Image (cartoon, grey):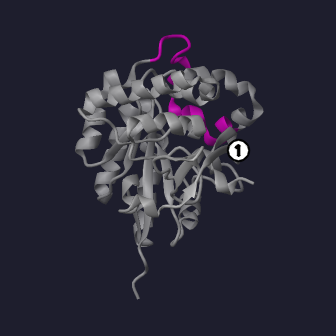
Amino acid sequence: MTEEEIIVGLRVDVDTFRGTRDGVPGLLKILKKHGLHATFFFSVGPDNMGRHLWRLLKPAFLLKMLRSKAASLYGWDILLRGTFWPGPQIAKKLAPIIRDTEAAGHEVGLHSWDHHRWQMHMHRMSTGQIYKDIQAGVDSLEDILESAPRCSAVAGWKANQQVVVEKSKFGFLYNSDCRGESIFRPVIDGVEYAPQIPATLPTYDEVIGHNGITADNYNDHMLELIVPERLNVLTIHAEVEGIVCAEMFDNFLAAAKTRNIRFVPMSELLPDDLSTLPIDSVTTAPLPGREGWVCWQASLVS
């Protein structure tokens, strides 16, 4: 009896200049080797990730950085970007890589304009500031690809109902702004918005170093979390699986194939008739392994 194929949505978050320059080409080679396609969400504005430096004063963030060996993942030079010198404009300098990604058959969407600013300050942004930030990112990708992105996923899962409303003004087919268990149509104040495809599986930095999970058993652990008859969405990062952990990710995909697991772009998870999707909403709540709050599928938060 043939084992049932398990479909997994594969999203690649590209947070930084280094991730775009070095990680994306590495991932394109790995995915081509395995005959797979994914959804790449690009940060396109200034790389100011060095401004996260002050967060090392927070114990939870410091422990996460030590567990995941963040300096080796992201490079020591990241600490200088947006601090000791201006952060480089990612899309302006690396536009050919974004074009290559789309040309290779991958889905391309918007992650952020300024990843650091969104992740750290979104909750304090006005409606106008949120709209302006999304608009800058959309315009940048449209200039590069000659068409507007059809999907988006906020940086760090930092979103709330206000973000969902502002995103509706850009005509995205879907968004992936929250953690959850099923695809749904968010309804806010009686108005229905574009579907949300939640991330369902943890990221590398959320599990490595926890409960005995090491680089040696990480792949096995993640494969055990992928189960049939439910939504499976895996988020990887160009800075992690595309660079330092590239060999591990290559092995992960090979092992997944032996289990009849197939990875697809996020849009392939959507039904033909979006009206069949259940109604839900979004809210904010903590997430184990990650500092602070993230956006959640509301029905899962008590």
User: Compared to 194, does 211 lie above or below?
Assistant: below
Number of residues whose C-alpha sits closer than 10 Å to that of mark 1, classed few (under 14), some (14–19) or many (20 or more): some
Q: Which residue is mark 1?
A: 285
Residue 231 horizontal/vertical position (percent):
51, 63
Check the picture and name the quadrant holding the N terminus: bottom left
Main SS category, magenta section? helix
In the image, the segment drawn in magenta is 64-87
Check the picture and name the quadrant holding the C terminus: bottom right
The residue closer to the viewer here, 24 or 212, is: 24
The reply, left or right, for residue 138 in relation to residue 233 is: left
The reply, left or right, for residue 57 in relation to residue 75 is: right
The reply, left or right, for residue 241 in relation to residue 288 is: left
Q: Residue at x 51, y 21 (%)?
A: 48
In what element is the residue under mark 1?
strand
Any part of residue 201 in sight = no
Does the magenta segment cover residue 36? no
Q: Residue at x 57, y 37 (%)?
A: 156
User: Compared to 248, does 278 lie above or below?
Assistant: below
